[in-house]
Image (tube, helix red, strand yellow):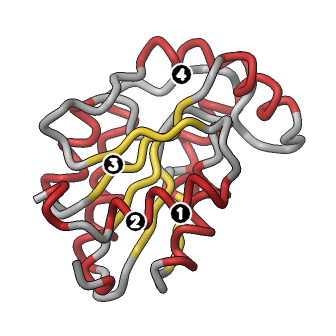
Amino acid sequence: MDNSTLHIVVMGVSGCGKSTVGTLLAREVGGVFLDGDELHPQANVTKMAAGIPLDDADREPWLREVGRRLKDSEAPLVIACSALKRSYRDLVRASAPQALFVHLHGTRELLTTRMAARPGHFMPLSLLDSQLSTLEPLGSDESGIQLDIAQTPESIVERAAAWARKPLLHA
């Protein structure tokens, strides 16, 4: 697959390393990284900072914006976006059907440790369990790969980039 057509969503719950892996993956594929958190309306950020989980109505415009950014990008683009449910990924794919999903997963213990080490982030540790209960793993019919965050970010990026460049795996 030509790198210029790569549109990748690095997904998973808070603390899984979406921003770290996304930044490195964008560099690896010669693309641009965008943190989906920056696309949230302020009302969503305020709600999450208060420890209130977002509902589907809160997420819809945000997910549509993620899809729009992917669709409109002429260069390789990697976006960090939780995309926890199949229906959320479907909203992204409605605008960007070519989107590939890299699902970062790990144990609750590792996620908790990582979240506790991020002072100043708007997502409180108290919402992790809500995200874990909402999470729907990628379906076998979705263009995606699941990678364990117990690996180094570099190892994850190497595997994700190799997978994304093989069009027959996700055609």
- Judged from the image, the secondary structure of the residue bearing numbered disc 1 is helix
Dot in front, 3 or 1: 1
Q: Which is more toward the observer, 127 or 75?
A: 75
Q: Residue at x 43, y 66 (%)?
A: 161
Judged left or right of residue 116, residue 137 is left
User: How far from the left and from the top, in percent, is residue 120?
Assistant: 86, 44
Q: Earlier in the sequence, mark 2 or mark 3?
A: 3
- Between discs 2 and 4, the one toward the N terminus: 4
User: CA–CA distance between discs 2 and 3?
Assistant: 26 Å
Where disc 4 sits, the SS reads loop
Q: Which mark is residue 162?
A: 2
Going by the image, does 81 lie left or right of 90?
right
Q: Name the residue tied to disc 3.
A: 63
Q: Look at label 3 and name its amino acid.
A: Leu
Please give the residue where the numbered disc 1 appears in the rendered image.
Answer: 158
- Proximity of marks 3 and 1: CB atoms separated by less than 8 Å: no
Residue type highlighted by circle 2: Ala
Observer-side mark, 1 or 4, equals: 1
Tell me which numbered mark, 3 or 1, is placed earlier along the sequence.
3
Q: Are marks 2 and 1 in contact (CB under 8 Å)?
A: yes
Q: Label 3, label 1: how many angstroms apart (C-alpha)?
A: 27 Å
Q: Is residue 16 above or below residue 18?
A: above
Is 134 rendered above or below residue 37? above
